[in-house]
Image (cartoon, helix red, strand yellow):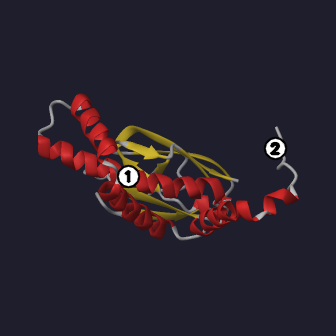
Amino acid sequence: MTHHAPPFRPALSAPQHWPAWVGLGLIWLVARLPYRVLLAIGRVMGWLAARLIGPDRRGTARRNIAICFPELDEAARARLLEANLRDSGIMLIEFALAWMGSPRTLAKIPVTIEGMRFQPETLTVAPGDSVVWVNKDLVPHTVTSEAGGFDSQIIQAEKSWRFTARKKGDFAYICTLHPTMKAILQVK
């Protein structure tokens, strides 16, 4: 299915639309920044939002966390609330990246190993692109092609491993320490 952009209407150049164009331009510029910079900006935006957000919204989030996690003490719920609000800033930045990022930029986003899963479970890159796996779990993992094309060896917690994809194809991979962890690297 092919999607076509609607034709540009000259009326959209009128001054009342300039703020929207400036906003789109800012989103376009943000989407061109390196991913690590984007995450830092998102964390700052989330931190600011956590402090500037209205007390009603903060109170709603606090009540929802208390209902969903009654087993947590008040300090743990407060940490979860802060993390949730901070991650909201990252979500906004990643939205800009998903909306206006180039396929090449999107391919540079690292694969996260967290919660005993590879995220994303399927990643598509071009030949010559490098892929970085970042272990956010507390335990070590591996990134091992089932067909023998690549093997990270052990990636300790909070460490990463980089692989440059050279050959086209679909490469299923697993963590040899936790074989239920599976994902696919597509090189097209």
Q: Please give left or right for residue 152 compared with residue 101 in the image.
A: left
Q: Amino acid at mark 2?
A: His
Mark 2: few/some/many CA within 10 Å (<14, 14-19, 20+): few
Residue 186 shows in the view: yes
Q: Quadrant of residue 25?
A: bottom right
* Residue type, label 1: Asp
Above-or-below relation of 104 to 113: below
Q: Which mark is residue 3?
A: 2
Residue at screen point 52% across, 63% down: 163
| Gap between marks 2 and 1 measured at Cα | 32 Å
Q: Nearer the viewer, residue 126 or 62?
A: 62
- Is residue 137 visible in the rendered image? The answer is no
- Residue 38 locus on image (x, y percent): 48, 65
What x and y, as percent, mark residue 54?
Answer: 33, 49
At 33% across and 60% down in the image, what residue appears? 47
The residue tagged 1 is 87
